[in-house]
Amino acid sequence: MRLTREYVTRRLVVFLTVIFVAATINFLIPRLAPGDPMMAMLQRMSYQGASLEGTSDLVNEYREMFGLDESLFVQYVRYWAGLLRFDFGYSLAHFPVKVNELLLDALPWSMGLLTVTTLLSFAIGTVMGALAAWKNTGVVKYTVPVLMVLAAIPYYLVALFLLYFLSYSTNLFPASGAYSVLSTPGFSWSFIKDLISHATLPALSIIISGMGFWALGMRGLMISVLGDDYLVLAEAKGLTERRILWRYAVRNAILPQVTGLAMSLGGVVSGAVIVEAIFAYPGIGWLLYSAIGNSDYTLIQGITFFLVLSVATSVLILDLVYPWIDPRIIYENGGR
C-alpha cells in the first residue's frame, strides 16, 4: 500500500474544486429565490409593534448596510473575501448578531444529537444486518421484513408518530425544545436528565429509521462475501463460527459501511432539518429552517458552506485513510 504524491495532489484539487463550485452555487441560490430579506425583516419588526413609516427609505438603508445594493459581482467578491476569513457576516434576521455566533450556539446541539444517534444506529443496524445474513443466528434473520419497513420510513414520519404517542397522548416526553424553560443550564444531574428527556424523541426517530438502512446494507454486503475462499479456509482450520463471523466475514464486508458512516458523520453539522423543526430542537437544522423562512441570505450561506466543507473534508480524509483500513487497496499508477 502506498499513497503517491500524484494521487494526493489530485484528491486535493478535487476537494478544492468541489468547495469552489458548491460555494458559488450557495451564493447564487438564495439570491435567485423569491422574497426580499429586507421586507421580511421589516415585517417582523411590524409584528413586534414597530412603526413602518418611511418603509422604502428604511429598506434602502438596510440594503446598503448589508451590501445588497451592489452588483452581483461585487457581492460575490465580498462573499469570497468573507469565506476565506471564515467570516459569514451579520445575520439579516438576527442583526446585529453575526452568523458565526449563531452557528457556534447551534452546532453543539446538532453534533451531540446526531453523532450519538448516527453511531448507535450504525452499530445496531450493522450487527443486526450481519446476523440476519449469517447462518445459525436464530430469530434475527426473520427481522428482515421489519428492517425493510424501517428503512423505508422517513425520519419525519417516525418523529410525528413518536410525538403523538409518546408526548401528546401519554406525556412521557417533552414535545419540543432542548431543555425546560425553568431549568438552569449547568453540569447538574437534574439538568442532564432534562436534556436527555428532551433529546429522546428526536434521537429515537433518527435511530429507528437509520438502523434499518444500515442493517439492510450490511446484510447485502455479508451475502456477497459468504462462500468466499478465505471463509472456507477459516472453517477448514477449525476456527469457531463466532470468530469466523466477526474476524473474517464482518471485517471484509464492513468497508462500504465505513464509507457510509464517514459520509454520515461528515454531515452531522447540518443537523436533521425536518426532525429538529418538528421538535423545535435548537440545532443547525432548526437554524437553517428558520433562515429559509426569513430569507436570511447570510445565515443560509454560512450553514450550507459549513455543511459542504465538512462533507468534502470527511470524503478527503476517507480517501487518504482507506488504504490503512483495507491493505488490498493500492493508490498507484493513476490512483487505483
Image (tube, grey):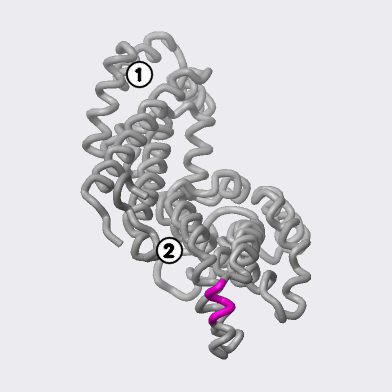
Residue 68 visible: yes
Please tell me how crowded label 2 is: few (under 14), some (14-19), or many (20+) other residues with Cα within 10 Å.
some
The kind of residue on which mark 2 rests is Pro
Question: x, y percentage for residue 185?
Answer: 43, 63
Q: CA distance from mark 2 to mark 1?
A: 36 Å
Secondary element at image label 1: helix
Q: Which mark is residue 185?
A: 2
Q: Which mark is residue 329?
A: none
Question: x, y percentage for residue 171?
Answer: 71, 63
Secondary element at image label 2: loop
Vertical placement of residue 216 versus 316, above or below: below
Residue that label 1 marks:
62
**Residue ID at (61%, 59%):** 217
Question: x, y percentage for residue 202?
Answer: 60, 57
- In contact (CB < 8 Å): disc 2 and disc 1: no
Closest to the observer, 265 or 194: 265
- Is 230 in the magenta? yes
Question: x, y percentage for residue 211?
Answer: 62, 62
**Residue ID at (22%, 29%):** 81
Please identify the quarter of the rendering in which residue 262 is found. bottom left
Q: Is the stretch drawn in magenta largely helix, strand or loop?
A: helix
Residue 182 visible: no
Residue range highlighted in magenta: 229-233
The kind of residue on which mark 1 rests is Tyr
Please identify the quarter of the rendering in which residue 227 is found. bottom right
Vertical placement of residue 247 versus 177, above or below: below
- Is 144 in the magenta? no
Horizontal side, residue 209 vs residue 192: left or right: right
Q: Earlier in the sequence, mark 2 or mark 1?
A: 1
